[in-house]
Every structure is written in structure tokens, then in C-alpha cells.
Image (cartoon, helix red, strand yellow):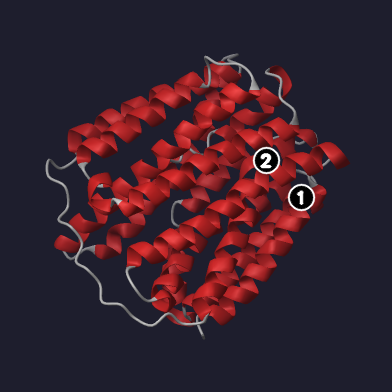
Amino acid sequence: MGVGRFVYTPILPGMLRDAPLSAREAGLIAAANFAGYLIGALAAASGAARAARPLVLIAALAVSAATTAAMAAVDGAAAFALVRFVSGLASAFAFVGATAITLEALARRGRLELQAVHYAGVGCGVAVSALLVTATQAAGGGWRAQWLVCAIASALAAAVVASLAPRDPPPPARAEAAAARKPGFWAICVAYGLFGFGYVVTATFLVTIVREAGGQGEALVWLVVGVTAAPSILVWSRLAGRVGLGAAFALSCLAEAAGVAASVLWHGLAGALVAAALLGATFMGITALGLAVARRTGGGEARRVVAVMTASFGLGQIVGPVVAGALREATGSYLSASLAAAAALLVAAVLGRISDRG
């Protein structure tokens, strides 16, 4: 998932220049990927038992690798968008399936504290993709070669998963007793959608922002995102245990808002690195904390709660790159889009803080 879903970001500057693509088209391609992820996540959540079958997981990983390779073989914004849409579907089924298999195995062994290792995989994938793109660029490879190299790495990783995956799917989850839905549930739903809008502008265009500003260290910036994302779930989980879920959610949104603003207000490599570190250190943590608050306040079955939250997040995530691309073409920079994203995160912080009290 760290490669299949996020490698578009470090490769995008080369595509903008050489494909070529406009900023508006780049935003629409990103939105297509997130639309695929939204539909896939809802479909996978509604059939979690099927999504958790090892063969489904392996197939999803194979499709993810294949669509990564396909980006090197097609031309035009419409074709890129279609491929990224299918890639989003595959990423969602892979993430839901792998999470179900892993967490069930950890629960059976009484080692749920190790779930942070599972979620660290996304950050590791981001870091690996940064290294692969950098190495390919250094060898003289263009954006097509970068997609192919990352596809090969994804295929090799999928083969490793296929050799390690259990033969039997996890047992079906037990039905949960219905509980009253608290008022704070809708606050966290809106906050989660605002988070989707707020993080995705920087997550999609950060490397492009660095290049357009004439800065150096594009690869280092994306590597920092992955390195800081890897341990973030563990850090935020421990903080939530001290200050509470709602407070931790609010703090993580505030930290991410600072990073999003830094990406356009603090020029130079230092500002880009701060933005990268704050983005990586928060986006997985906010995801986990938001879902935890929703499960506490939502009542009913966890699957339905997750579906509602995923829909809210997905809508924000789809709108974000479209708005950012349009504003970039209208204003000539990502300043207004990034500041709007930071403002959305500030509102999310306020809603997240009050949601756990309702």
C-alpha cells in the first residue's frame, strides 16, 4: 500500500514535466485513485470475511503491482486516471484483508500490542519508494522507468506475502450488540472528512511543491515522510493512553496543520523537511485515533461505523486534489490550497476534541 497508493507523489513532478500533465489533470488522477480506494474499502468492509481470505489478499497485491507497471505503459490523463482507480480498489482490498488476517492472528496469540508493526508497513513502503525513485533517477531513468522499478518491487513483495500467508481465512467476527450512538459520533465523522481533505493536498503535491520552489532534496523529503510514518501509530497510541483519544486526535490534527502550512510558508529544504516529518508522523495516527473515537461513540456494529467513517474520509480525500489542482492553475501556486487544507485540519482538531466528550 505504501508503494501502490503513495508512489504517485514522488513520480508526479517528472510526469508533470514530461508526460506532460497539467496541475488540474494531476489532481483528477489522484482523485481517481482515492475514489477507487473509497469504493474498494466500502466493498471490502461489507464483505470482510471474503476480503480476509489469503487468495483475495494475494490477488489484490498482484493487481496493485500490475497497475503500478501499467502506469508506464499508458498515455493521457484519462488512461492514467483509470489505472489509478483500479489501483485504489486493489489497495483497499489489500489493506482490509491484510489487517484482518494480521490482527486476528495477533489476537489469537495475545499480542495485539504488535499491531503497530503491521501499520508501520505503510511508512516503510513510502520510504522504500523514495529510495527506488531516487535510484532510478540517478541511473538516468525517467518517470516510466520509475513506475516499472516500483512495480517490480511490489511484485516481489507480493510473492513474499504469498509464501507467508495462512491457508485458512480468519473466523467470522462475532456480531456486536447494538449500542446507543452518542452525539459526538457525527462530530468525529465530519472531522474525519476534513482530515481527508487536509492531509491529501500535501500528501499528493509535497514533492511537486519542493521542485517548483527550486529546492533540493526531493527524495529526502519523501523518505522523511515514510521514516516518520513507520513508528507513528505506536507513539500516538501511547499518547492517547495518557491524554485520551479525543485530545490525541486534536493534537495530531494540529501538528499536521502546522506541517501543511510549513510546506508553503517556510521556503527552502528546512521547511520541506519539517512539513514531511509532520505529515508522516501524523496521517496514520489520525486515521487510527479517528476510528477509535468513532467506535467508542458510534454504537452498533464496528463494520458499519467504519463504513460511515471511510465514506466521510474518502469524500474529503477525493475533493482535496481536485481543488488543489484547480487552485494551482488559477493562482500559479499551491499556497491557497495548502492554507485551505491547514484550516480544515484546525476545524477537525476542534471537532475531534469535543467528539469524545459527547
The crowd level at tag 2 (other Cα within 10 Å; few <14, some 14-19, many 20+) is many
Q: Is residue 150 visible?
A: no
The crowd level at tag 1 (other Cα within 10 Å; few <14, some 14-19, many 20+) is many
Q: Which residue is identified by label 1?
A: 337
Q: Position of residue 96 (x, y in %)?
A: 34, 49
User: Could you tell whether 202 is left or right of 66 in the image?
Assistant: right
Q: Position of residue 102 (x, y in %)?
A: 25, 52
Q: Which residue is identified by label 2?
A: 205
Q: Earlier in the sequence, mark 1 or mark 2?
A: 2
Residue ranking furthest to the right: 331
Residue pictured at 68% horizontal, 70% vertical: 347
Q: Is residue 333 visible?
A: yes
Q: Position of residue 293 (x, y in %)?
A: 45, 73
Going by the numbered disc 2, the residue's amino acid type is Phe
Residue pictured at 21% horizontal, 43% vertical: 53
Please, is residue 256 above or below residue 48 in the view? below
Residue pictured at 64% horizontal, 76% vertical: 350
Residue pictured at 59% horizontal, 71% vertical: 251
For this rendering, which residue is in front, 100 or 214?
100
| Marks 1 & 2, CB-CB < 8 Å contact | yes
- Residue 282, label in figure: none
Q: Position of residue 181 (x, y in %)?
A: 42, 80
Q: Nearer the viewer, mark 1 or mark 2?
A: 1
Q: Could you say which quadrant of the image residue 327 lies in?
A: top right
Is the N terminus in the top left, top right, bottom left or bottom right quadrant?
top left
Please, is residue 201 above or below residue 17 in the view? below
User: Could you tell whether 357 is left or right of 60 in the image?
Assistant: right
For this rendering, which residue is in front, 157 or 277?
157
Instruction: Label 1: state its secondary structure.
Output: helix
Whole-number angstrom distance, CA of label 1 to CA of label 2: 10 Å
Going by the numbered disc 1, the residue's amino acid type is Ala
